[in-house]
């Protein structure tokens, strides 16, 4: 059995006011080229197909085009789940009809769900599609109030699988969660901390032949070779500038042993951080592709006249311009400040605002209240 | 050939702050009962499946449930088009995959489109699915700038059909437009008047064995027995209180002659206008179902203490309360005024606002500007 594992497409993503749709369309066309070349038996998309619950229509069109090509034209089964960015209700539209066409799109966990079972010469492989869900939702599905954390939810689902299915056969977990020990990027939305930690323990998955994860944007294994994040389709922040994005081709043999091949994804425009003096950068030689999305760090000390305007004539897609910190230039403090803020979660951002206004740090009790309010708002958005 | 014709479901509709979803779900369950009883060869939904381009998730769920039942469980082909309320881009998601399941959902007119052809013992019947489109969109599809009105667009499409297909065979037009001579209700959104009239001439359709229309909410024939609006799923305003909503069952014979059967739709809660004295109405006998949506006209002259609160204890779903116009009660003027305003189009509403503020009527030239601005905004909303 040979399958391609991808995740975190985030269609409809906007980075610094720039719509990523063209980049995403380009990348998905390359993805389809990879599919044609490698001819996998199925394709896994481990959540966050869209970047938000009501995506722009261009994103809807792009997902439609891509899935239609894979499922209708290339006739390759697609196994996809919703992530924390997707709207389970909206993504469910048509899913029953799609199943008969070979598109298995699960956005709501049901209690007695069945895996999608595909066969190779050695017998069945059971793919368990586990959409992202809050611990409270898992508690409801299993009618078990003791489920309070993401880890407990995963544990419950895994027990259920191990109890109901033949563990001698090959099983694949498709999930969207944050495994303890995984490396974060800035562009992932933090998962809910209500009721404890957002983490799931990787050791839970040791009985699965392969664990196909979404959520973390950097391609990586966690503790074992066969417990993997494919990483996102594209870089979605400068914290990912050093990533090498890829999709993961998994060759699974008779006894479930997996051989992993990372197939690189080369984007239309890369995310890069460049550093230099203004006059030097104007030569245009700082990057091989001047269309790249750039975070520019200027080393110049003195005043510069409209550096952004001038640099954009050479590098049209500069998203950030940062000046070297200089005490003689108070503006720089602001820039650093803004940059720092962009890395904060909603709750941290509020805590920082509170401290700015009140002069005292946010008390622990209030921190909890804010955390709950942020959680409630995100939940509401997700349910839209 | 036997088919059911329905239209204007407007899922997600809100009438006076009340979500109609429960009523729509009830009615669609009855609709499915009708389908099971009558066993049509196919089902036509002639546009306005949703009430707006981004419908609430409950509406998405309801449409999904209904179509899944019809297509997957009952295995009856569904032929649906988008209306002026639907978002063509969003409704198109999955449509290629759905076709193979027997759901033909067309939201974008293409130039060399093919009809959906179904067969009975006498041969083929060609169903032409013509989604709602603005004249400018039709001009683009056919690369013909002379198309300026809805009528010209329909003419062009019909010429194309008559030119490309065997006119000896049976053809059905499925469209969403305003036929001249049709009876309007208040709940229909006016179509664009840019570039002339919103009307299409019914005589264009005389070569079609049956013309299945959506847009007007009252079930009706226009000029011929076989040119019909099925009417909406439910009453969506009090101007429709006297309508008898139905779906249309069409029995088409060998030579295309159609026998029409109107199957009544009995809603969970009816829309009714009732009139009487406050004390009399409190008995609860004014309607057979106290849960009905009511527009209450009170005939009392004098002051009443919280009539709405008291009446709602008996009739919980009063949407309007109107007091008999009385010069001794200046509030009544406001009520009449509000009621009148609710019947106005966006442009008329602006003209009335302009006159209120300026004291002079809105000049013709500015009327055109407003008409264009309203059109642009509606177009933008539609394109979302």
Image (spheres, coloured by chain):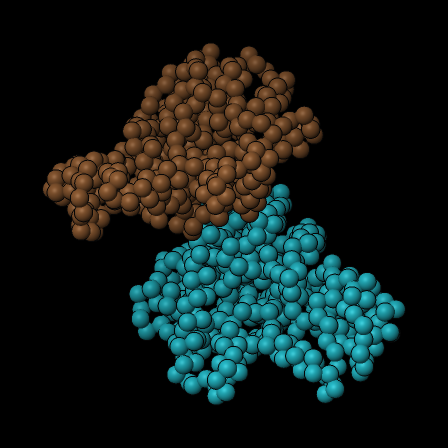
Chain colours: A brown, B cyan
Does residue B2 lie above or below A64 as drawn?
below
- Seen at 18% across and 47% down, the residue is A303
Residue A226 on image: x %, y %: 43, 17
| Residue A49 sits in quarter | top left
Please indicate, yes or no, whether residue B128 appears anywhere in the rendered image: no
- Seen at 46% across and 61% down, the residue is B381
Residue A186 on image: x %, y %: 39, 34
| Residue A31 sits in quarter | top left
- Seen at 44% across and 66% down, the residue is B377
Does residue B300 lie above or below A351 as drawn?
below
The C terminus of chain B: image quadrant: bottom left
Please indicate, yes or no, whether residue B30 appears anywhere in the rendered image: yes
Q: Nearer the viewer, residue A50 or B3?
A: A50
Residue A37 on image: x %, y %: 30, 29
Residue A259 on image: x %, y %: 38, 16
Does residue B361 lie above or below B135 as drawn?
below
Tally of numbered discs: 0
Q: Nearer the viewer, residue A345 or B338?
A: A345
Q: Nearer the viewer, residue A286 or A268?
A: A286
- Seen at 77% across and 62% down, the residue is B316
Q: Nearer the viewer, residue A74 or A346?
A: A346
The N terminus of chain B: image quadrant: bottom right
Does residue A221 lie above or below B326 as drawn?
above
């Amino acid at each position: 059995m040979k399958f391609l594992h991808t995740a975190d497409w985030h269609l409809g993503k906007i980075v610094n006011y720039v719509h990523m749709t063209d980049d995403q369309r380009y990348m998905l066309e390359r993805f389809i080229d990879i599919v044609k070349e490698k001819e996998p038996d199925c394709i896994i998309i481990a959540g966050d197909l869209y970047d938000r619950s009501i995506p722009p229509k261009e994103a809807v069109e792009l997902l439609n085009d891509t899935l239609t090509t894979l499922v209708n034209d290339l006739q390759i089964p697609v196994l996809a789940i919703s992530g924390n960015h997707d709207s389970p209700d909206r993504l469910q539209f048509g899913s029953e009809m799609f199943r008969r066409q070979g598109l298995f799109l699960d956005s709501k966990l049901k209690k007695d769900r069945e895996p999608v079972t595909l066969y190779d010469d050695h017998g069945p492989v059971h793919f368990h599609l586990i959409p992202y869900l809050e611990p409270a939702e898992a508690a409801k599905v299993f009618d078990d109030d003791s489920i309070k954390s993401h880890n407990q939810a995963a544990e419950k689902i895994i027990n259920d699988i191990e109890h109901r299915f033949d563990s001698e056969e090959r099983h694949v977990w498709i999930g969207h969660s944050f495994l303890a020990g995984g490396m974060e990027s800035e562009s992932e939305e933090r998962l809910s901390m209500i009721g404890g930690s957002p983490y799931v323990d990787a050791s839970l998955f040791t009985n699965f032949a392969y664990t196909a994860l979404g959520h973390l944007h950097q391609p990586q294994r966690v503790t074992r070779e066969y417990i993997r994040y494919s990483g996102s389709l594209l870089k979605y922040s400068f914290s990912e500038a050093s990533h090498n994005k890829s999709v993961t081709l998994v060759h699974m043999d008779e006894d479930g042993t997996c051989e992993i091949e990372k197939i690189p994804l080369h984007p239309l425009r890369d995310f890069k951080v460049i550093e230099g003096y203004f006059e030097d950068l104007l030569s245009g030689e700082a990057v091989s592709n001047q269309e790249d999305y750039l975070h520019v760090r200027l080393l110049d000390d003195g005043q510069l006249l409209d550096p952004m305007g001038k640099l954009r004539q050479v590098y049209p897609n500069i998203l950030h311009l940062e000046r070297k910190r200089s005490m003689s230039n108070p503006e720089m403090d602001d820039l650093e400040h803004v940059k720092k803020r962009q890395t904060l979660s909603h709750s941290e951002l509020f805590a920082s605002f509170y401290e700015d206004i009140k002069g005292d740090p946010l008390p622990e009790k209030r921190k909890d209240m804010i955390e709950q309010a942020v959680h409630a708002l995100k939940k509401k958005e997700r349910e839209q």
